[in-house]
Amino acid sequence: MDLWQLHIFKKVIDLEGFSKAAEAVHLTQPTVSSHIRDLENHFGCRLVDRMGKKAVATGAGELLYNHAARLLQMAEQTETALAEFLGKIGGRLEIGGSTIPGGYILPRLIGGFTGRCPEVRVRVHVGDTAQIIDDIFAGRLDFGIVGAETDKARISQKALINDEMRLIVRADHKWACRQAVDLRELHAEPFIIREQGSGTLKSLKKNLEEAGSGLEALTVTAELGSTASVIQGIKSGIGISVLSPIAVSDELRSGALKALPIRGLDLQRNFYLTTHADRTPSPACKTFMDYLENLLSGGAYNS
């Protein structure tokens, strides 16, 4: 038995499958299966059962899982403590962002961080909120910033950025010169929504429900897979939509689009710093998260 085998075993249980675990640790599925067999031979008992397409821990496996989690966390803490003691801030960071943080916020802030820590290489993965959270859970990302909360086990979230979405319309739209519109006025207007899994869509649904309305009350003409495609849809006249002004800051400055508040609808939301609760961040990861919190926490992001 070694820590690497325990790490693989924990991935199999966390991800409920051998193939997903193999992908997460960059091994083949037969190799992952071989490591699990070695553990079972070492302890002389079955640790994993296959229930249909899922891999689940046996009673003995649950006991091992709990001890393995503590051992692996202690190993990460040891690595981090020694690296911090020696002043080593370097390596590669894999971070994720849902559409607005990943496409518009993080790219503007990475330069300041790498200027301070030039030996750190940062790679940003952009996806919808659900995908980013899944990748953090699977260990493919060190942390992420997403636009919605989750109840997924062992995922920790902290509000980092406050954002207030707005109704976005073309400059020649009949409402473009208005100061605001009423919620009931939206019902008959062609409306564009984001795809399922989007934090923007989840926030819009929640805010509509809190206002006594719902997504079904809108005249949805298109469901598009990215903020960029929604912006193009608005520009081409497919409909109007609710988006973060951060995403359309260039269009707002040029006057191509207008942003309006909606009376009767609270469009406040947060972007959340999202991590795996059981994972100790590397010195580079901790330094970057501290850098982001110092810059962004407690106020709105200024585009």
Image (cartoon, helix red, strand yellow):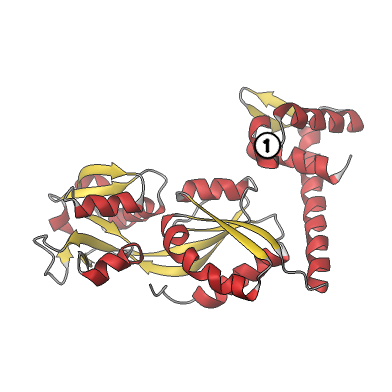
The kind of residue tagged 1 is Ala
Q: In this view, does 265 lie to the left or right of 160?
A: left
Q: Name the residue under label 1.
A: 21
At 15% across and 57% down in the image, what residue appears? 184
Could you say where residue 253 lies in the image, as x and y percent from the top left?
26, 72
50 or 112, which is in the foreground? 112
Farthest residue in the top direction? 52
Q: Position of residue 138 (x, y in %)?
A: 63, 45
- Viewer-proximal residue among 190 and 56: 190
Provide residue 43's location: percent of width, then percent of height.
Answer: 90, 33
In the displayed structure, would residue 13 be above or below residue 260? above
State the image coordinates of residue 288 (x, y, percent, origin top left): 62, 68
Crowdedness of circle 1 by 10 Å Cα count: few (<14), some, many (20+)? many
Residue at image location 65% in from the left, 31% down from the top: 19
The answer to whether any part of residue 290 appears in the image is: yes
Quarter residue 46 falls in: top right
- Helix, strand or loop at label 1? It is helix
Judge left or right: residue 39 versus residue 201: right
- Up-down relation of residue 132 to residue 254 (above or below): above
Q: Is residue 232 left or right of residue 66?
A: left
State how many labels appear. 1
- Quarter of the picture holding the N terminus: top right
Vertical placement of residue 18 versus 274, above or below: above
Q: Can residue 214 be seen in this view?
A: no
Image quadrant for the C terminus?
bottom left
| Picture residue at 64% right of the left edge, 34% below the top | 16
Q: Residue furthest left?
A: 174
